[in-house]
Image: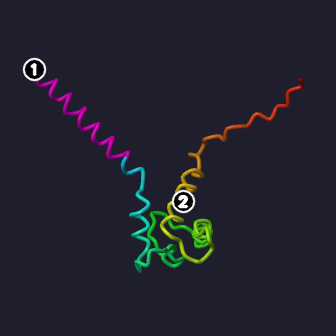
Amino acid sequence: MKLTTLKLGVLVLGLFTFSLSNAQDRQKPDPEKMFTALDTNKDASISLDEFKARKTKKEIPTETLEKRYAAMDADSNGSVTLEEYKSGMLRGEKGKKRPEGAKKKKENTEVSED
């Protein structure tokens, strides 16, 4: 009985570890795969039309997509290269919104009187 319980415990632990590692893999999108999917005409750059045509879970207003595209188009030539796309994704991760209810960390604004 103890051996069966031990085997079951090891199996559950193994499954938990496996599912946890898969969940972590899914959290980090591969920018190169995303770029390739967006570049529908395969010209090694993403046009504004290609960017706006992407499928998302939530509908994003056209104005918001245009702003995001302009922010990624570093040289303002009307197309986004893979390097610009990667850079834009990094900037986007740094600027992600906090979960609802999370408070912004206050800076110390007190002036010391020395």
Left or right, 58 with reference to 101 = left
Q: Quadrant of residue 5?
A: top left
Compare residues 93 and 20 and report the one nearer the observer.
93
In percent of width and height, residue 54 lies at: 46, 71
Question: Which residue, given by chain and number where applicable, does mark 1 sit on?
Answer: 1
Left or right, 62 with reference to 33 = right
Q: Magenta stretch?
A: 1-24
- Which residue is located at x 57 percent, y 51 percent? 96
> So how many labels did they put on this image?
2
Tag 2's secondary structure? helix
Main SS of the magenta part reads helix
In percent of width and height, residue 39 lies at: 43, 74
Q: Quadrant of residue 112?
A: top right
Residues packed near mark 2 inside 10 Å, few (<14), some (14 to 19) or many (20 plus): some
- N-term mark: 2 or 1: 1
- Which residue is located at x 50 percent, y 64 percent? 83
Question: Which residue, given by chain and number where applicable, does mark 2 sit on?
Answer: 87
Q: Where is the C terminus found, in terms of image quarters? A: top right
Residue type, label 1: Met
In percent of width and height, residue 41 lies at: 41, 80
Q: Where is the N terminus found, in terms of image quarters? A: top left
